[in-house]
Image (tube, rainbow, N blue to C red):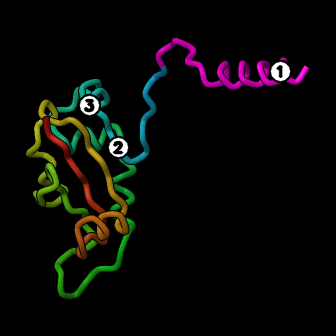
Amino acid sequence: MRCSLLILIAALVLWGCASTGTAEKPRSSRYAISEAEIVNSGATNAYDVIQQLKPEWFLQSQRRGVKSVSIEDSSVPVVYVNDTRYGDIESLRNISSLNILEITFLQPSEATTRFGTGHVGGAFLVKLK
């Protein structure tokens, strides 16, 4: 009886862990845009991709932060391309969507942790092919 119970439990555990064999649809991340999403958007540059797929990122970045007297506009997100500082939001218009693997938005605290101070508006990370 005890052996049968152990076999039943083991079978249930294995059955619960087994794959269904069907491919799951990739989930869209709240803070990332995948290459497939970029291609399907039909946008020509990174700015337009974000505008079409995640316009709330622009709104979030505009609501954040306190303006600094010493920095002209410290609440504007910073754009990084392959982890190198690239420019402000407008610089996204210079990045062709054909070259992008992924676009990620970092909240201000995440951007500050990763890149240091000066990221009150967060950061856009663009990963190129």
- Count residues near mark 3 (Cα–Cα under 10 Å), then give few for <14, some for 14-19, many for 20+: some
Q: Position of residue 74 (x, y in %)?
A: 24, 74
Q: Position of residue 34 (x, y in %)?
A: 31, 34
Q: Mark 2 points at which residue?
A: 32
Note whether 13 is above or below 90 in the view shown: above
The disc, 3 or 1, on the residue closer to the chain's N-terminal end is 1
Q: For residue 16, which quarter of the picture?
A: top right
User: Residue at position x 18%, y 57% from top?
Assistant: 79
* Residue 111 on the magenta segment: no
The disc, 1 or 2, on the residue closer to the chain's N-terminal end is 1
- Count residues near mark 2 (Cα–Cα under 10 Å), then give few for <14, some for 14-19, many for 20+: some
Q: Distance between the residues labelled 1 and 2?
A: 49 Å
Magenta region = 1-23
Q: Where is residue 55 in the image (x, y as percent from the top left)?
A: 35, 46
Q: Position of residue 67 (x, y in %)?
A: 29, 80
User: Residue at position x 11%, y 37% from top?
Assistant: 96
